[in-house]
Image: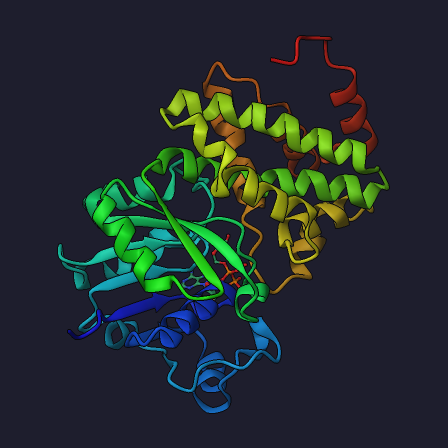
Amino acid sequence: MSKENIVVLGAGSFGTTLANVLCINGYPVKLWSKSQNVANDINQNHRNSKYLGDNSLSRNLRAETDINVAVNNSDYILWAIPTQAIRSVLSEYIDKLNHDHYHINVAKGIESSSKKRVSELFEEFGIDLNHFALLAGPSHAEEVVAKQATAMSSISLNHNLAKKVQEFFVTDFLRIYTNTDLVGSEMAGAFKNVVAIACGICDGFGLGDNAKSALVARSISELSGLVDYFGGSRETLSGLTGVGDLIATCFSKHSRNRHVGEQLGKGKDIQTVLSEMVMVAEGVKTCEAFHKIQAELPIEMPIVEATYQIMYEGQSVSDMIQGLMTRAAKDEF
Ligand SMILES: NC(=O)c1ccc[n+]([C@@H]2O[C@H](COP(=O)([O-])OP(=O)(O)OC[C@H]3O[C@@H](n4cnc5c(N)ncnc54)[C@H](O)[C@@H]3O)[C@@H](O)[C@H]2O)c1
């Protein structure tokens, strides 16, 4: 039986990495790159030096800069572009997509302008959620491309689709579970990027393990309130897309969101930090989105609020810490 045609949109770190896994697994895959230089590097040198350094890629991996050519004849579309860019790509190319396409998203964020999760954005464009899956969990591209053992979750309301995505990516270095809790997984994946910024602030400011561990633990409490409110499952928070991804992002040298926080903690302002980065740090805009969500809901989100105040209102890190530490005493649960 012939294998499904898969197109990957976004030849950054993770899109390239996942397209490479699909090639290893024998799928006909096309990788859409906005950049001609990146496409040339992949096609001629079998590398994506801009995003993945010296890691060598499958010789079968082909990059394409014309999205119409890339999407042509595809059955599955894997979205690996930043959350805030998905709307513009969907708007421009929705006419080229058909109702038979299946969509797999790996972006972890909330659209700031609409406060929507990525699946809600796809629904707005008329895409049936039975054709939508999320692939998430603790999966730094730098480790997956180097074939280091990684576990992820394939999440869809359509269990058959979740199983299909599992089949696409499972290898001896990538273990994929399935799950149906889209709301909880999307919320957790977006939220952990904000917590990673807060943890980075602790690192940059010179706080210790106690502070970071407390932040991570309290962030689960904050996230539980959100997940309950939006109808997700608390069980998800104890899994790969919950605590698994939170730990990876908050404690890793690879995390750009933690890096952003670290620079803020050292006293840089957010514009300077972002101007020094090549890759996306989803937590910055997603923090703004959660800040808006919090303003409309009866949910307390002190970690989001403190991180927002530092990034968007110029609050000092010492005031943030003081503010969090001197909140009214309360029961833990
Ligand atoms: N890198 C990882 O380890 C990793 C792991 C899991 C999930 N993710 C998620 O995957 C998503 C992509 O992350 P990444 O690490 O690959 O980011 P990246 O910054 O490395 O690459 C982003 C890609 O999107 C493209 N892009 C940016 N704006 C665009 C636009 N307006 N239109 C079209 N293309 C555009 C860029 O050219 C680039 O190819 C993010 O949401 C991230 O949170 C990343």
**In the rendered view of the protein, which quadrant contains the N terminus?**
bottom left
3 shown above or below 285? below
Which corner quadrant of the image does residue 316 belong to? top right
Q: How is the image coloured?
A: rainbow
Residue at 41%, 60% in the rendered image: 80
Residue 112 percent across, percent down from the top left? 46, 40
Residue 6 higher or lower than 314, as above or below: below
Q: Which residue of the protein is positioned furthest toward the right in this rendering? A: 206
| Image quadrant in which the C terminus is located | top right
Q: Is residue 246 visible?
A: yes
User: Can residue 316 be seen in this snapshot?
Assistant: no
Nearer to the camera, 176 or 126: 176
| Image coordinates for residue 161, horizontal then vertical, percent | 24, 51
Residue nearest the observer in this picture, 151 or 316: 151
Residue displayed at 81% across by 23% down: 322
Q: Is residue 227 above or below residue 285?
A: above
The spot of residue 98 in percent (x, y) is 14, 59
In the drawing, does residue 289 fall left or right of residue 30? right
Left or right: 82, with 260 as reference point: left
Q: Is residue 235 above or below residue 126?
A: above
- Whole-percent x, y for residue 214 in the image: 72, 28
Is 179 left or right of 200, judged from the image as shown?
left
Q: Quadrant of residue 182?
A: top left
User: Which is nearer the eye, 141 or 312?
Assistant: 141
Q: How many marks?
A: 0
Q: Residue furthest front?
A: 172
Which residue appears at 26% of the width and 40% of the height?
A: 157
| Residue ID at (41%, 20%) | 229
199 sits to left or right of 296: right
Who is closer to the viewer here, 32 or 115?
32
